[in-house]
Image (cartoon, coloured by chain):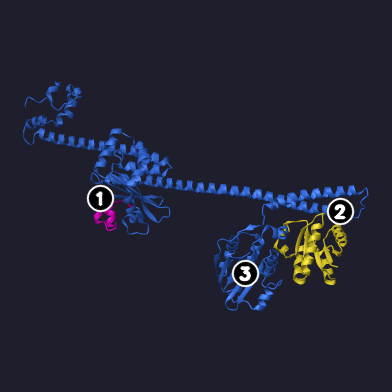
Chain colours: A blue, B yellow
């Protein structure tokens, strides 16, 4: 045995063993420990052992078996310890992530955290993660967001940044959400659009993976029949991991992960870890999106509620006003009759009292006071009436289109189309909007009834000297002269439908307005009713204004 | 001389109108209800009816429709404590609309106007 080896010495000096490392000072004095930790792997010792008692059946030969076994066991222990450490780290990491996932109701936060966890070195350390989500209508599996470097340069920059800052996972998630989410979305916009797939494409790799709820580890995407060439090109990788995101059998989305930059093969551990991770992610995404929907619904309901409250307030106000109107009207009736009688008889009395009669001044007092009361009454009542004046200067074209708009359902129901041919520069006419609108409605109703199987009405307005003409032409069967003559006689029509009084009332209203009604009809061709309104001036319309 | 029918369920109003309108030279008959008015219209000749709207029993507007339907040549002036019936299109059938007042000059003017229109 060479004298250089130190294995059998009780105490050695540091320069005697070349396998000692800094911190191994204890081994200089502890022979057993030194032997077990260093000598068993020391080539010098093994060489000496080989020479000891040489031959294959000597004790040293068996001793070699033991050493081999010890070393193998030691390596196994080391491997297992390493694995246990890895698992512990993974569990700690999953715990950290899942705490965020469990407590967050923000979809962005959940997504940032999940994607960070997959791509960060401290997490699963994959190069790129892409998330597809089933959209609200459940029509499309839509590329939602992707995270990862696009190329080696960018990857280098990002990894450097991460290393130099030593961010925690949570910090990285937050950075992604607050600073990079929009950038990443924009960066991958084309890719995300390209890989979106309609849910109805059951044969597509993505949809099939989601429907079968089974993770797929694709080793060569180019050979996959279930994906379009352009999609595979856009993804630009051969090896791809697809993990379905499912929560309570509800399909949420699909997670794609790959090592596009460094090309490291995806391991069975990667697959297993991501599969485990997918469950809380799916759950968190669903919860967050449900929460978002809930928020949206809440906003809608709050808004509806506000509108309802406003309307209720309006109704209450209107009811109050209606009540006031009703009370005023009742008071009017109960007060006006006796006032009329008191004041009326007083006037009558005064008329028959001689001028020198001392009682005259008493009677005059009664008249004066009753008139005052009547004036107060009139003021109160006319206030509410003044809110809706109907006799005013009106735009005739507006009146025509307004009436047709109001009767649109009636016209449609009777399959009657209508068109306008309106003179744009008409002066305004002073008329009672309600009454003239009633006339137009009566004429239109007449035309509708004349065309039971549908037809067309043309409404024209035009200016002729001092009159505005409103002409309604139908393409119905027309009327005989006899019918035309009787049509405006009171209660000619037997077809009084609700509005009841028909053309006779119409005629009366037009008379009152100083307007003319002209009827021209041709059997088999149709009828034209023309209302000829005076362009009223204040002075020639006094009597109407009083009505 | 024109013959008028006053229809009002208030007795004093009927008396007042009768007195005042007789002073104007009209021959005046009155009725306290729609039914009474119909009865009189069926048996007597009138040139004009002055009609209250809110009455117990048949309302003035119902009576108005009857008159317009059966007696197309007989003008009617509505004389009421309410101005709101102006909005009711069935009141538009009447030839005149007067809101009651202790000053009867408006009613008198309206009667004269409608009678004149009828004659022309």
User: Is the residue marked by circle 1 packed among few (<14), some (14-19), or many (20+) residues within 10 Å?
Assistant: some
Q: Which of the 4 quarters of the picture holds residue A542? A: bottom right
Mark found first going from the N terminus, 3 or 2: 2
Identify the residue at image location x=82%, y=66%: B37
> Which dot marks residue A347?
2
Q: Which residue is mark 3?
A: A530
In the displayed structure, A32 sits above or below A414; it is above
- Judge whether residue B52 can be spotted in this image: no
Q: Secondary structure at mark 2?
A: helix
* Start-end of magenta stretch: A214-236
Q: Position of residue A411 (x, y in %)?
A: 57, 67
* Same chain? Circles 3 and 1: yes
* Same chain? Circles 1 and 2: yes
**Is residue A414 found left or right of A180 in the rendered image?**
right
Closer to viewer: mark 1 or mark 2: 2
Identify the residue at image location x=31%, y=56%: A205
Q: Which of the 4 quarters of the picture holds residue A112? A: top left
> Which dot marks residue A237?
1
The Cα–Cα distance between marks 3 and 1, rounded to whole angstroms, is 79 Å
Mark found first going from the N terminus, 3 or 1: 1
Between A497 and A477, the one nearer to me in the picture: A477
Instruction: State the quadrant of the C terminus of chain A.
Output: bottom right
The Cα–Cα distance between marks 3 and 2, rounded to whole angstroms, is 48 Å
Mark found first going from the N terminus, 1 or 2: 1
Q: Position of residue A4 (x, y in %)?
A: 8, 25
Instruction: State the quadrant of the N terminus of chain A.
Output: top left
């Amino acid at each position: 045995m060479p004298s250089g080896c130190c294995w059998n010495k009780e105490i050695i000096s540091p320069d005697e063993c070349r396998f000692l490392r800094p911190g191994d000072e204890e081994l200089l004095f502890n022979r057993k420990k030194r032997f077990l930790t260093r000598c068993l792997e020391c080539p010098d010792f093994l060489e000496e052992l080989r020479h000891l008692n040489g031959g294959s059946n000597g004790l040293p030969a068996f001793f070699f078996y033991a050493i081999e076994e010890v070393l193998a066991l030691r390596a196994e222990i080391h491997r297992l310890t390493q694995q246990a450490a890895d698992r512990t780290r993974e569990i700690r990491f999953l715990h950290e992530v899942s705490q965020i996932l469990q407590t967050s109701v923000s979809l962005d936060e959940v997504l940032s955290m999940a994607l960070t966890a997959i791509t960060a070195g401290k997490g699963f350390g994959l190069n790129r993660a892409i998330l597809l989500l089933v959209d609200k209508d459940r029509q499309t599996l839509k590329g939602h967001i992707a995270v990862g470097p696009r190329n080696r340069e960018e990857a280098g920059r990002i990894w450097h940044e991460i290393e130099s800052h030593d961010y925690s996972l949570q910090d990285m998630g937050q950075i992604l959400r607050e600073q990079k989410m929009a950038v990443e979305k924009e960066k991958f916009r084309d890719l995300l659009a390209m890989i979106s797939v309609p849910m109805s494409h059951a044969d597509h790799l993505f949809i099939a993976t989601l429907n079968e709820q089974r993770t797929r580890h694709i080793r060569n995407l180019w050979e996959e029949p279930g994906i379009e060439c352009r999609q595979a090109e856009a993804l630009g990788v051969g090896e791809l991991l697809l993990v379905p995101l499912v929560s309570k059998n509800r399909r949420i989305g699909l997670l794609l992960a790959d090592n596009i930059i460094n090309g490291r093969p995806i391991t069975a551990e990667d697959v297993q870890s991501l599969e485990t991770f997918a469950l809380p992610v799916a759950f968190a995404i669903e919860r967050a999106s449900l929460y978002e929907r809930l928020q949206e619904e809440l906003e809608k309901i709050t808004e509806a509620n506000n509108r309802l409250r406003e309307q209720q307030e309006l109704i209450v106000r209107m009811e109050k006003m209606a009540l006031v109107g009703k009370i005023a009207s009742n008071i009017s009736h109960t007060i006006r009759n006796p006032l009329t009688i008191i004041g009326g008889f007083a006037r009558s009395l005064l008329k028959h009292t001689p001028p020198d009669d001392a009682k005259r001044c008493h009677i005059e007092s009664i008249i004066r006071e009753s008139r005052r009361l009547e004036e107060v009454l009139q003021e109160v009542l006319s206030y509410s009436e003044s809110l809706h004046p109907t006799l005013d200067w009106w735009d005739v074209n507006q009146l025509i289109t307004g009436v047709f708009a109001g009767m649109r359902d009636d016209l449609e129901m009777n399959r009657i189309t209508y068109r306008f041919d309106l003179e744009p520069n008409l002066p305004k006419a002073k008329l009672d909007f309600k009454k003239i609108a009633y006339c137009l409605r009566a004429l239109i109703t007449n035309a509708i009834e004349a065309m039971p199987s549908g037809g067309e009405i043309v409404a024209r307005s035009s200016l002729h000297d001092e009159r505005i003409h409103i002409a309604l032409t139908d393409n119905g069967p027309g009327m005989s002269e006899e019918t035309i003559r009787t049509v405006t006689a009171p209660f000619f029509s037997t077809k009084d439908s609700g509005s009841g009084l028909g053309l006779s009332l119409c005629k009366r209203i037009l008379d009152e307005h100083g307007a003319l009604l002209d009827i021209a009809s041709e059997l088999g061709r149709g009828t034209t009713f023309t209302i000829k309104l005076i362009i009223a001036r204040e002075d020639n319309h006094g009597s109407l204004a009083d009505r | 001389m024109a013959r008028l029918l006053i229809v009002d369920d208030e007795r004093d109003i009927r008396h007042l109108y009768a007195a005042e309108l007789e002073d104007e030279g009209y021959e005046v008959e009155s009725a306290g209800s729609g039914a009474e008015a119909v009865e009189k219209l069926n048996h007597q000749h009138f040139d004009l009816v002055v009609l209250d709207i809110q009455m117990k029993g048949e309302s003035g507007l119902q009576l108005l429709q009857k008159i317009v339907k059966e007696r197309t040549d007989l003008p009617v002036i509505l004389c009421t404590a309410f101005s709101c019936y102006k909005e009711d299109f069935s009141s538009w059938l009447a030839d005149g609309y007067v809101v009651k007042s202790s000053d009867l000059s408006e009613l008198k003017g309206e009667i004269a106007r409608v009678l004149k229109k009828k004659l022309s």
